Amino acid sequence: FQQRKLFYLFMSGYGGAISPLLHHQHCVRRTSGEIFHLKETSDDPTEDVKAEKQLRFVPRTTVNQLPKHRKHERAKAIRNYLSAEDSGIFGWVYAHFLKGSLFLVIFEMTIYIFVINIIFGWLYWIFGGCCGDEEDLSFWDDFNFSFQTFTTVGYGTLSPEGVSANIIVFFQGIHNLIMTTIFAGVVVTKFIRPRWKFRCSDFIVIRDIFGVPTLEVRVANQDGKTTELKTLTATLTYGRMESRSSGERFYQMTNLQLKQSERHSLSGVWTLQHVIKKGHKGEDDGSPLFGQTFDVLKECLAHLHLTITGVDEATGEPVNIIEYYEADDILYGYKFQDQLQFTKGINGAPSIITIDFAKLNAVEPAVVSYPVHRGSRNNKNDCKGQISQQQQQQQQQQ
């Protein structure tokens, strides 16, 4: 038993963490390849023998299939907000100008300037009193005067005459000052914003690395030759539906511990990893994904949020990337295909590193120690099992 335990821990790659694990978690590998995890026990060997087997892990591949529809192709959940303060049309326009494409915003501004000058030209044409003798002028002369007023060109050949024309010029001047300031601010803001092509993989894979289930997700800077991101920090948050003894359900959010959450710069590909391991007794160092099956994740409406912050090298502006993953995007028994190809230089020639961004979402089957729950369905890893078990305890107390 001890030899098998030490061999498994050594092959699992726990390294310096082997010693504390010997006192808190025991693992047995059968000849069939199944790995049995025992309950946390004390250092007393007699208590270790009496420990109950909670989970068994079976080596499997391709536990769940790739989703038929990608994230952006799936139907989004409809959210109804009650008693909320709506920003209205002005809030929508504000968000559209700041989030939309720079060229689209410039095109929309051009259309607006053309339309608003037609309106003011029509007012000059209707109310009269503009640009001298009206018998020799047409509507397009009034439109030309309106456009010159908007752009403050003022050639001097056209000028307002009469009270009505000067009143229209007064309001048009105020409008022009406000809109010119807004347009200039929007263009400058969008021009100095970082322009990067940052992508995250469409899937999250879980596979065994040195015998330990490990979660992996990829991020790539596809414009690394031109724009390099500096001082990156990654955060992966796991959320699921849980319930209290009263039956009230709520979302529980937990930050997953990444093997490498910070990076100096990124001009290519970065693979984030989270080790799915059982925590030590009395310590909060385990993974909330330990013992979770794909069916449980779907049943509990599990999801993952990936947030990456960094600084654009060219502008020095902060960059924020947020990606959302549902349970269908988590693939058990898969691994990402290798994106890097290294060619060693010959006779003093420089080595070549080739990054194939087309393989960002390419996956292939891999072995994963998949958890199989023993006994009843009411266990701590089942979100519905929590409700039924707590209700049974309440009934017994009553």
Image (cartoon, rainbow, N blue to C red):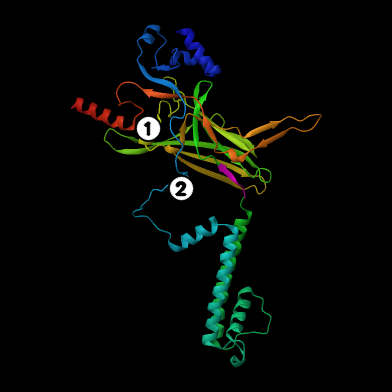
Q: Secondary structure at mark 2?
A: helix
Q: Residues within 10 Å of mark 2 (few under 14, many from 20)?
A: few
Q: Identify residue for label 2.
A: 73
Q: Nearer the viewer, residue 279 or 112?
A: 112
Was residue 175 drawn as part of the magenta stretch in this picture? no
Indicate the position of residue 257 as horizontal and vertical percent values.
50, 30
Task: Measuring from the top left, give residue 261's x and y in whole percent.
Answer: 56, 33
Residue at mark 2 to residue at mark 1: CA–CA distance: 22 Å
Residue type indicated by callout 2? Glu
Q: Amino acid at mark 1?
A: Asp
| Residue sitting farthest toward the top | 46
Which one is earlier in the sequence, the residue at label 2 or at label 1? 2
Q: Which mark is residue 295?
A: 1
Q: Secondary structure at mark 1?
A: helix
Are there few (<14), some (14-19), or many (20+) residues within 10 Å of tag 1? few
Query: Which image quarter holds the N terminus?
Result: top left
The mark found on residue 75 in the picture is none
Residues in magenta?
Answer: 195-199
Question: Residue 138, relative to residue 57: is it above or below?
Answer: below
Q: Quadrant of residue 167?
A: bottom right
